[in-house]
Amino acid sequence: MSAAIPYRSTPVFNEATLPAALRSEHRTKAEVWGVIRVTEGRLKLTYLDPVSETIITPGVPGLILPEQPHFVEPLGAMKMQVDFYNEPPSG
């Protein structure tokens, strides 16, 4: 079985360039998984259904399920990127 490969990735954002759309409620499309990867610093990921929060750090990515409402908040200086997959990502 081969590992899933992202079909698209966002630019690398920092705390100043992180778009407002990612800071407010949004979701992936049907059959699209997202993996948020932080390369520097920390980012708070809030899931809205069901409600929970997690802190994403380098080495601890955040998984977004298809159509799962969520938003992110930088916790100080950080750099992050989102990879999008059309099948469940591995790792």
Image: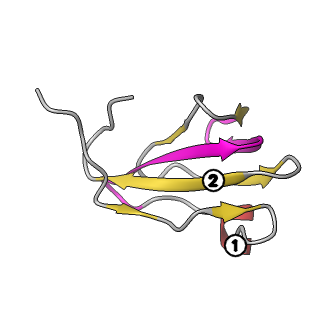
Whole-percent x, y for residue 14 in the image: 73, 62
Specify the segment rendered in magenta. 29-52
Total count of labels = 2
Q: Name the residue at 65% across, 64% down.
A: 13
Q: Position of residue 24 (x, y in %)?
A: 73, 64
From the viewer's perspective, is residue 81 above or below residue 64? below
Q: Is residue 17 above or below residue 28?
A: below
Label 2 environment density (alpha carbons within 10 Å; few <14, some 14–19, many ≥20)? many
- 51 left or right, relative to 32: right
Q: Which mark is residue 80?
A: 2
Which is more toward the observer, 48 or 3?
3
| Residue 44 included in the magenta stretch of the image | yes
The crowd level at tag 1 (other Cα within 10 Å; few <14, some 14-19, many 20+) is few
Name the element at disc 1: loop
Which element is circle 2 on? strand
Does 36 appear in magenta?
Answer: yes
Q: In the drawing, what numbered circle is on residue 19?
A: 1
Decide which of 86, 41 is in the foreground and name it. Answer: 41
- For this orientation, the residue located farthest to the left is 1
Residue 30 found in image quarter: bottom left
Give the farthest residue toward the right. 76
At x 77%, y 42%, the residue is: 41
Amino acid type of the residue that numbered disc 1 sits on in the rendered structure: Pro
